[in-house]
Image (spheres, helix red, strand yellow):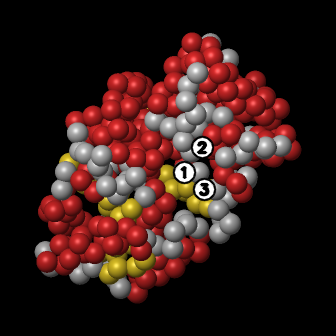
Amino acid sequence: MPHNPNKVTERLFQSPSKYIQGPSAFHNAAKYLEPLGKAPLLTCDAIVYKIAGKQLIDSLQAANLKVTYAEFGGEITTPEISRLQKIAQDNTSDFIIGVGGGKTLDCVKAIAAALQVPVASLPTIAATDAPCSAVSVVYTPEGHFDHYKFLKNPDIVLLDTSVIAQAPARFLAAGMGDAIATHVEAKTCRQSVNPGGGLPAELSTAIGEKCEETLFKYGKLAYEANKLKAVTPAFEAVVEANTLLSGLGFESGGVAAAHSIHNGFTAIEALHALLHGEKVAFGTIAQLVLTNSPTAELDRYISFMLSVDLPVTFEQMGIPNVTNDELRLVAKFATAPGETIWSMDISDKVNEEAVFWAIKGADAAGREFIRRTGWTKARV
């Protein structure tokens, strides 16, 4: 049964105010960021600071912006949001800049929302669709999923593909794992309210379809280019699919079981080393099993995931001896009240037991495909 408790009838599409992507784009950062304010708080982790943060700060300061730098602690938690928010307040920051991965960018969105100031997302990897979205995923200090914050989209999203190409190709593949869920999930919740609070616009379907088409067409080429740190047309296309198309597609189209199952997997300590998109990729196969997709469709997605080294079995995820009790805990968390799985049009047929067996079925489908096709074991 669709999830629309308030009987919303309006369709809603939301997006960042401006999206810029290209090689060496950070060189022009001041031009794009100056309209947001004059005294930003910029946060990134210590690694990103060395890769891009220091150079970016120098560039912004040369353009007469008064930049306050605060190191991101590595996990988006309520205490971390509060700590950085206080630094911004103490320095009278009039907008917030996040540089780095999805957790950094989710954190700055939450800070900006609390302070009611503009926010700019400057991703250094294309591993998630967080840069464009109005959602922040908050975790506990132990790394378990805690809750979603529904905020506003960033005012500016600025991607420097020369920087993104320097990141390990595993991050790009994880972004594809996150993005491949976009159309799979959205088409199962067309009658439910999306994360923005409205019904999906027709445009969201087209975006989801284009996102998936781009991944199947260019994903493997982009992955191989990234291994060589090469900014090719295929690489540019997949970066856009991972970031812009996936971000707009999920937010306006809807989110379903694949991400709920990802959230459930955070309950297994051994999976904390996996990237968000690696868990979502497996969750996508589990959703396809849950919705009784035919073998040919499962094969298509499994083949794609294996081609870019995404995990399709428990063994590839690093939990070859996972117990049924652990998987039942995953299913319990995945079907918790408020989880996105309840947005599915077939949610009246979903329960904890069905999700448990879908997760088991996804592992079985992955193992059977590898056995049947003789596929070489993937890396994760």
Q: Which residue is mark 3?
A: 273
The foreground one among 224 and 112 is: 224
Q: Amino acid at mark 3?
A: Ala
Q: Position of residue 291 (x, y in %)?
A: 66, 21
Please identify the quadrant where the C terminus is shown.
top right
Q: Residue at x 68, y 66 (%)?
A: 142
Report x, y in % for residue 372: 63, 17
Q: Residues within 10 Å of mark 1 (few under 14, many from 20)?
A: some
Quarter occupied by residue 143: bottom right
Residue beneath disc 1:
275
**Residue 323 image offset from top left, x and y in percent:** 83, 43
Decide if residue 93 is in sight here: yes
In the displayed structure, does residue 89 sit left or right of residue 177? left
**Quarter of the image that includes the N terminus:** top right
Q: Which residue is mark 2?
A: 279
- Is disc 2 placed on a helix, strand or loop? helix
Q: CA distance from mark 1 to mark 2?
A: 7 Å
- Residue located at (54% from left, 42% from top): 379
Q: Residue furthest bottom?
A: 90
Find residue 6 and report its horizontal and vertical position in percent.
Answer: 61, 37
The answer to the question of whether label 1 and label 2 lie on touching residues, with beta carbons closer than 8 A, is yes
State whether residue 153 is above or below residue 293: below
Local secondary structure at mark 3: loop
- Badge 3 crowding class, 10 Å Cα cut-off, few under 14, some 14 to 19, many 20 or more, is few
Question: Total number of numbered labels?
Answer: 3
Of 100 and 198, nearer the camera is 100
Q: Helix, strand, or loop for circle 1?
A: loop
Judge from the rendering whether residue 15 lies leftward or rightward of residue 356; answer left or right.
left
